[in-house]
């Protein structure tokens, strides 16, 4: 698995796929000028999978990438409390898109990929709710927020893939793996 995400590992294990090896791919994750969020997340998953496959020849490799977007603005992992507070203020009372892509490189070099966009509607958050969430630091290492934590209490509606919002769309991932003859 070309990801160090504990969420992705747990999701894969939930459906019976236990990664033989965890090998996060070290790639440039910069957004290209004029690159739309869906194109970006698909490119990231593919580049991570290809890099890990190159470093682990003869192995099946799975990589994923997930981003939270408000409009065309991609929210990256916050580096500190102030950045996360801005993210929470931006998400408060709004809908955002969560785009999750998965890419598999089979040991023979065949590449397959899937992408899912989900919508998450957040309630209007009070200053205290924002402060409590930020100070709890659940969001550390996550893009935007960690939905499977206390943030879930702020979610009014989800349209799409819950597991995709967590970090790996299981329906698409399982069907991709099966379709590629892995399992």
Image (cartoon, rainbow, N blue to C red):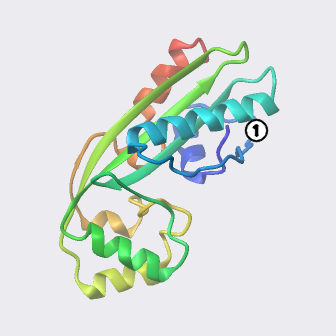
Residue placed at 20% from the left, 63% from the top?
Answer: 94
> Would residue 77 be seen by someone viewing this image from the given angle?
yes
In the image, residue 81 above or below residue 69: below
The spot of residue 60 in percent (x, y) is 70, 24
In the image, residue 62 above or below residue 79: above
Residue placed at 48% from the left, 60% from the top?
Answer: 76
Q: Which residue is nearer to you in this view: 17 or 25?
A: 25
In the picture of the structure, the residue carrying the numbered disc 1 is 21
Q: Quadrant of residue 129?
A: bottom left
Q: Quadrant of residue 44?
A: top right
Furthest-front residue in view? 33
Mark 1: few/some/many CA within 10 Å (<14, 14-19, 20+): few
Query: Which quadrant holds the N terminus?
Result: top right
Residue placed at 33% from the left, 81% from the top?
Answer: 130
In the image, residue 114 above or below residue 78: above
The spot of residue 51 in percent (x, y) is 72, 35
Helix or strand or loop: what does disc 1 sit on?
Answer: loop
Query: Which quadrant holds the C terminus?
Result: top right
In the image, residue 180 above or below residue 37: above
Please give left or right for residue 141 compared with residue 1 in the image. Answer: left
Q: Which residue is nearer to you in this view: 62 or 50?
A: 50
The spot of residue 21 in percent (x, y) is 76, 38
Residue placed at 35% from the left, 67% from the top?
Answer: 151
């Amino acid at each position: 698995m070309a990801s160090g995400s504990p969420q992705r590992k747990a999701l894969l294990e939930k459906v019976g796929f236990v990664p033989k090896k965890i090998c996060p791919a070290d790639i440039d994750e910069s957004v290209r000028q004029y690159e739309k969020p869906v194109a970006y997340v698909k490119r990231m998953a593919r580049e991570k999978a290809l890099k890990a496959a190159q470093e682990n020849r003869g192995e099946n490799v799975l990589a994923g990438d997930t981003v939270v977007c408000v409009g065309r603005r991609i929210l990256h992992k916050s580096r500190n409390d102030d950045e996360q507070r801005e993210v929470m203020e931006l998400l408060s009372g709004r809908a955002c898109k969560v785009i999750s892509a998965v890419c598999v490189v089979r040991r023979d070099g065949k590449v397959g990929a899937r992408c899912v966009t989900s919508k998450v509607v957040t309630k209007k958050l009070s200053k205290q709710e924002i402060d409590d969430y930020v100070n709890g630091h659940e969001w550390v290492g996550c893009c935007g927020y960690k939905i499977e934590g206390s943030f879930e209490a702020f979610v009014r509606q989800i349209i799409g893939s819950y597991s995709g919002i967590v970090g790996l769309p299981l329906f698409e991932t399982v069907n991709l793996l099966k379709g590629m003859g892995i399992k």
